[in-house]
Image (cartoon, helix red, strand yellow):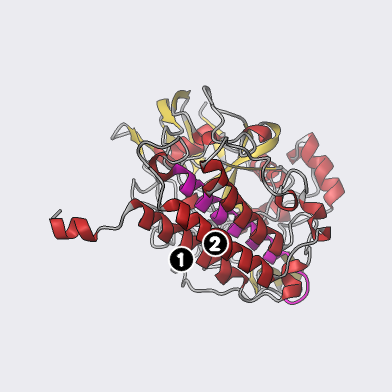
Amino acid sequence: MTLTQLNAAPSAADRIAAMLEEARARTLRLIEPLSEQDLHLQHDSLMSPVIWDLGHIAHFEELWLTRNLDGPVEFVEMPGMYNPFEHPRRVRGALPLPSLRECRAEMHEIRVRVLERLRAADFEDGSDLLRDGYVYAMVAQHEYQHNETMLQTLQLKSGAPYRAPRRVHLPAAPALAPNDAPMVRFPGGRIPMGTDDRSRAYDNERPRHEVDIPPFWIDAHPVTNGAYLSFMEAGGYENPAWWSDAGWQWLREARVSAPKYWEHRDDGWFTRSMDLVERVDESKPVCHVCYHEADAFARWAGKRLPTEVEWEAAASWDPDAGRARSYPWGDEPATIERANIDQLSFGTVRVGAYPRNISPIGCQGMIGDVWEWTSSDFTGYPGFESHPYPEYSEVFFGNEYKVLRGGSWATRPGAIRNTFRNWDYPIRRQIFSGFRCARSEP
């Protein structure tokens, strides 16, 4: 690099400021179509009012990028109204939430102070929060994740549908046969899982550790709408033989017979994504199914859901090179050219539409389109250390939550990688979730 190029290269502070500004620009773009009433209404008890998300985003940033950089690391400093543990989602609509004008003014004032503090940051000799800019990446990812949460809310929106600002033209792909479900083999072996990265990975992704995996088979692509329709038509929702005890109990209480947002009309099944209603495309991944539905389908198909160890192995491990990849296609970052991510497509695409989105053993679409349920409970890896606060991961460890992998169309590129772990209750269907199946080798 020449001296001129070196002088022109952006500083770490400049890059971080640009990252934070880009994250905020996306947040504001998503809320542009919303009225003040839309922002304040609790559209569903499962979700916060969107204005709460905006305030939480801002105060999380203030907590971590101003106060926690100069004092002991605390999460309990989070202002009461925006503390998610003090105020669960179902009650947030009753809080004295600010107007959009007031909220935006507060977001701006906080950002000014954050950028002032950024200019004094020491990324080499500073604390664990500052080293390699970790805390700034954490805050940006937090905003990215709330963008996806807001989109779940907007899919549930009361009144007129959310006018989605579609900006991405999805690539075409040929139709699949309804029951076209090829599987690929993972040869087994001792492989690394997780990461030791401390520049952006969350604590639950660490530490990198080795696991022994027997050979197994896994679906080459996510389960499609067409395959799921076959399950429905075979009486999948009526036959307790395919359901776990917990799943059958959920089904009797939920009284559903199709994925969320599906509607049966005289001329077939239709599905809705925000303001777009279209006939169910049998070649797209099924979306908005809960863990119990995924598990029942897998049992019906004579398979099972993969463990998260199997999922990560199938997404990352290159048996020929003897190494793990950061993404199915390699170590290049996730982009909208490589996978259906980053929100502005506002929907799934047919399986096979992204030929570069393929893992070393031949699994398609493991990043983007739909989060994929695994059979694993959300727990810490061997040697797990909470960082920088236990309320991000550790307080959720246990058997109440199932792990999801791979991201969805609503996931921002900076919040997804092969090691990223999402988790939710097994009954949740408002998330952009699908699945693929696995099978043990005899």
Q: Is residue 88 magenta?
A: no
Residue at x 78%, y 67% (from the top left corner): 41
Mark yes or no: residue 356 visible: no
Q: Position of residue 132 (x, y in %)?
A: 38, 42
Q: Amino acid at mark 2?
A: Ser
Q: Position of residue 416 (x, y in %)?
A: 48, 49
Name the secondary structure under disc 1: loop
Mark 1 crowd level (few <14, some 14–19, many ≥20, 10 Å Cα): few
Q: Is residue 315 above or below residue 226?
A: above
Position of 260 with respect to 326 (left or right) is right
Residue 256 coordinates in the image, percent (x, y): 80, 55
Q: Report helix, strand or loop for mark 2.
A: loop
- The residue wearing badge 2 is 283
Q: Which mark is residue 174?
A: 1
What is the residue that sits farthest to the left in this orientation?
A: 2
Report the magenta residues as a range: 134-160
The one nearer the camera, 330 or 182, is: 330
Q: Is residue 202 left or right of residue 391?
A: left
Cα separation between marks 2 and 1? 8 Å
Q: Are marks 2 and 1 in contact (CB under 8 Å)?
A: yes
Q: Residue at x 41, y 49 (%)?
A: 120
Vertical order, 100 against 416 (above or below): below
**Is 141 within the magenta?**
yes
Location of residue 355 (image quadrant): bottom left
Which secondary structure dominates the residues rendered in magenta? helix
* Circle nearer the N terminus (2, 1): 1
Q: Judge whether residue 152 can be spotted in this image.
A: yes
Residue type at the position of mark 1:
Pro
Depth check: 175 or 154 in front?
A: 154
Check the image and name the residue furthest to the right: 253
Q: Which mark is residue 53?
A: none
Please name the residue shown 61% across and 39% down the image: 392
